[in-house]
Image (tube, rainbow, N blue to C red):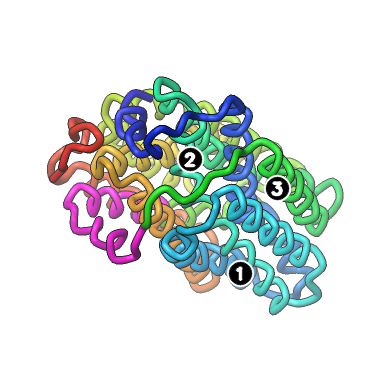
Amino acid sequence: MAQIEEISDTTGTPGQQPTAHGWPAVAAVASATFTVVTSEMLPVGLLTPIGDALDVTGGTAGLTLTVTGLVGAVSAPLLTPLLGRFDRRTVLCALMAVQAVGNLLAAWSADFAVMTAARVLVGIGMGGVWAIAAGLAVRLVPPESVGPATSLVFGGIAVASVLGVPAGTYVGELLGWRAAFVTVGALALLVLIALAVLLPRLPAEQEVRLGGVLRLSGNPRVRRGLAVVALLVTGHFAAYTYVRPVLEEVSGASAGMIGVLLLVYGLAGVAGNFASGAGAARSPRATLLLISAVLAVTVALVPLLGGSVPAAGVLLAVWGLSYGGVSVSTQTWLLTSAPGAREGVSALFVGVFNGAIALGSLLGGLAADGIGTTAALWLGAGLAAAALTAAASGTSPDRTRAAGTPGD
C-alpha cells in the first residue's frame, strides 16, 4: 500500500538495518495482532452459552466485550508512553503472556465476576500489543518493503475482526465455549514463543509522551478520521455483538447453522479487507464513504429481509465484505493525516477503536434488553449512516504530504 509506505519509512534509528529475519518477524507480529483481536471479540459468537453457564442475560453477557474494549481503549494510549524505554520484543512477549492468562482464566471462570477479571487482562494485553505492533514494520524490513509489511501487520487485525468470531463459534459448538477460550489462550502462548524466537532486539527508538499523543487529536483530519472510526465501529458492534440471538429470532437458524453463517461473513470480510486496502491506498475517503453506505443499508435490511437462512447468509456476506475494510481504511486515513507521528496516531486509533467496541456492545445490549434484539441492528444502521455523513464532511486526507513534512 503506497500511502502506508510513504509515511512509514522515516522513523528507524539512524544506521540501523532491518534484520535478515524481517518477513518471519513481521509474520509473528501479524500473528500477535490476530490473536489479541480474536481474543477481544471471541464472546460475540458465544454469548448464548456464556450467559446460560454464568446465569446472566444476553445483554449482561455482552459486557464481556464491553469491559475488554474499555480496558483496551485506556491501555493503548497509556502503555505506549509508559513502556517507551523497554525493548519492544520483551514488551510484546510480556503482553502476550498477559493475554494467555486472561483467556485461560476466562475458560475456568465459575461466575461472571471472574469472567470480568479475565476480560480485563485480555483488554490490557490487546490494547498494548495493537498499539506497539503498528510501529514495528519499518524496523523489520527494508524501506521498499515497509508498505506491504505494515499491511500484513494490520491484516492480522482485519482477519481477526472477520474470522475470529466464526472460528470461536465453531470451536464452541464442537467442544463448548470454555474450549474456545482455552484454544485462544494456547495460541497466545505459541505466538509468544514465535515472537521471542523471530524478533530481533528492538530497543526503544524515541520517547512518546502522553501529551503528544493527545495533541494529535487537534489535527482536524485526525479528529474527523477518529469520528468516522468511532461511529462505524460503535454501530457495527451495537449490531454484530447480538447477531447470534438476532439470527436465532429472525431467520430461525440453528446453532450449527449460525456457525456456518458467521464463517460466510468472515470469508467475505477477508476479501473486503484486501479490496478496501487497495482502494484506501488511492482514496481512503471514497473507500470509507462506500463502506459506510453499504453497512448502513445492509444492517438495516437484516431484520426486514433476513427471515430465511439463505437470505440471512447473503446479507451477512455483504456485511462482512464492507466491514472487512474498516480497519485498514480508517488506519490509512489517520496515517495519511498525521505524517511522521505513526506511533502516536496509532495509539489514538486503538484507543478510539476499542472504546467504540465497548460502547457499541453496551448500547446494543441496552437496546436488546430494553426493546428487543432487532433494535440493536437498527441502532447500528443509524450509526453507520452518521459515519457516512462524517466521512463526507471537511477536506480529504487523500493528498496528505509525505512523512517528515508538516501536515495541517
Task: Please tell me which residue is depicted at 57% across the width and 56% down the height of the picture.
Answer: 126
Q: Which residue is mark 1?
A: 120
The residue stretch that appears in magenta = 208-233
Q: Amino acid at mark 3?
A: Leu
Count the marks. 3
**Mark 3 surroundings: few (<14), some (14-19) or many (≥20) residues within 10 A:** many
Q: Give the foreground label among 3 and 1.
A: 3
Identify which residue, 383 or 109, lies in the foreground.
109
Q: Amino acid at mark 2?
A: Leu
Quarter of the image with the N terminus is top left
Q: Is residue 301 visible?
A: yes
Task: Please tell me which residue is depicted at 36% across the width and 56% down the height of the picture.
Answer: 348
Q: Is residue 214 magenta?
A: yes
Q: Which residue is mark 2?
A: 136
Quarter of the image with the C terminus is top left
Q: Amino acid at mark 1?
A: Val
Residue 65 sits in which quadrant?
bottom right
Task: Please tell me which residue is depicted at 73% across the width and 63% down the height of the picture.
Answer: 101
Where is residue 370? Give x, y as percent: 50, 73
Q: CA distance from mark 2 to mark 1?
A: 25 Å
Q: Secondary structure at mark 1?
A: helix
Q: Is residue 127 above or below residue 222?
A: below
- Which of marks 1 and 3 precedes in the sequence? 1
